[in-house]
Image: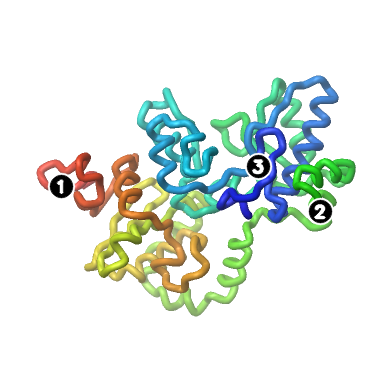
């Protein structure tokens, strides 16, 4: 049960919430308070979306090809589906799709909806929504999406969330929760991010071992935009001895790695320089711990639709009937 896999979630209005995710429970309390203030003023407000499951990579093609959210593997909007709609927006020059979306290949917590701190809200008076949301510790976080709000701080100390406890308990089908009391400062980190921070606090030996590779990339870590970097891996082709991994940089340049490179060293330097979070905590192998992993078909269709510059890719990295080679040179060369 989690906002990542989308199982056993609870619904309020059009939003999904996870009783085991403190951020998600806190978000529900805050929204209940905000909506109560607005409706008391006679203002229309409705929750369109809260938690958003990660989904599966095949959802990208559904969004890219104008499919509906009901056609995804889980039958609802997912991070992967929304990224497909963003690719559609790029392909149509903004005529269709959505103007922004988290890149699922940055990890399962790429979207704040999956972290449990974001909500998409329809309102007849966004100025008043801004006012009440700010008091509850929320604000608009994406300039191109007037409807998108995120938790960013503790709520004002004079707000009493306790009157909403019965509603929250009913939403989650019984049991109890203390998230509405806000006894602890708001912490925007995911459980994985907390673990990673603890690991990195004692990782000086690892940083020293990176040597010249880390020094080459390290300056780029100063820019928060570098968190958009990522590692992708085609696990079908890497079951054998083939190398099917790629590094994605903040400017959307994608570089495919190959067997002539020290792949482990490059990926480890990439992880350190760009502050990437592990996507698979069950593996210690660098090649399996950090990248977004997909099967061969998903890999091929992803790169076929990829909007950025691509370096080092081969014909086999694209669908057989849609390979973009020109004079024997792969796409982006």
Instruction: Name the spot of residue 54 as percent of width and height, x first.
Output: 52, 48
Q: Secondary structure at mark 3?
A: strand
Q: Which mark is residue 16?
A: 3
Q: CA distance from mark 3 to mark 2?
A: 18 Å
* Disc nearer the start of the sequence (3/2): 3
User: In the rendered image, which residue does mark 1 sit on?
Assistant: 329
Q: Secondary structure at mark 1?
A: loop
User: Would residue 280 appear left or right of 40 to someone viewing this image?
Assistant: left
Q: Quadrant of residue 187?
A: bottom right
Looking at the rendered image, the disc whose residue lies closer to the viewer, 1 or 3, is: 3
Q: CA distance from mark 1 to mark 3?
A: 46 Å
User: Would residue 310 appear left or right of 94 to someone viewing this image?
Assistant: left
User: Would residue 126 appear left or right of 73 to someone viewing this image?
Assistant: right
User: In the rendered image, which residue does mark 2 sit on?
Assistant: 175
Which of the two residues, 232 or 78, is positioned nearer the viewer here?
78
Assess disc 3: are there few (<14), some (14-19) or many (≥20) residues with their C-alpha within 10 Å of its C-alpha.
many
Q: How is the image coloured?
A: rainbow
* Disc nearer the start of the sequence (1/3): 3
Compared with 195, 108 (above or below) is above
Instruction: Name the spot of residue 96 as percent of width and height, x first.
Output: 43, 25
- For the question of whether residue 201 can be seen, the reply is yes
Q: What residue is at 76 percent from the left and 43 percent from the top?
A: 171
The quarter of the image holding the N terminus is: bottom right
């Amino acid at each position: 049960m989690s906002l990542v896999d989308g199982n056993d979630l609870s619904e309020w209005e059009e939003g999904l919430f996870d009783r085991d995710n403190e951020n998600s429970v806190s978000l529900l309390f805050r929204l209940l308070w905000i909506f109560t203030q607005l409706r008391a003023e006679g203002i229309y407000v409705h929750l369109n979306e809260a938690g958003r499951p990660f989904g599966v990579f095949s959802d990208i093609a559904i969004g890219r090809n104008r499919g509906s959210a009901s056609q995804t593997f889980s039958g609802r909007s997912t991070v992967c589906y929304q990224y497909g709609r963003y690719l559609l927006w790029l392909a149509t020059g903004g005529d269709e799709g959505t103007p922004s979306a988290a890149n699922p290949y940055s990890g399962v917590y790429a979207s704040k909806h999956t972290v449990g701190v974001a909500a998409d809200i329809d309102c007849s008076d966004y100025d008043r929504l801004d006012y009440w949301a700010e008091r509850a510790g929320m604000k608009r976080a994406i300039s191109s999406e007037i409807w998108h709000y995120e938790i960013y701080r503790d709520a004002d100390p004079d707000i009493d969330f306790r009157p909403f406890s019965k509603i929250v308990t009913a939403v989650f089908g019984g049991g109890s929760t203390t998230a509405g009391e806000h006894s602890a400062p708001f912490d925007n980190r995911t459980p994985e991010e907390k673990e990673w921070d603890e690991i990195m606090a004692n990782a000086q030996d690892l940083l020293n071992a990176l040597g010249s590779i880390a020094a080459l990339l390290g300056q780029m870590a100063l820019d928060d935009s570098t968190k958009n970097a990522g590692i992708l891996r085609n696990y079908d082709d890497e079951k054998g001895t083939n190398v099917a991994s790629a590094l994605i940089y903040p400017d959307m340049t994608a570089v495919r790695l190959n067997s002539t490179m020290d792949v482990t060293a490059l990926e480890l330097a990439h992880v350190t320089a760009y502050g990437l979070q592990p996507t698979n905590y069950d593996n210690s192998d660098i090649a399996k711990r950090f990248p977004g992993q997909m099967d061969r078909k998903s890999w091929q269709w992803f790169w076929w639709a990829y909007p950025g510059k691509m370096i080092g890719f081969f014909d086999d990295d694209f669908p057989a009937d849609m390979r973009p080679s020109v004079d024997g040179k792969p796409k982006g060369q």
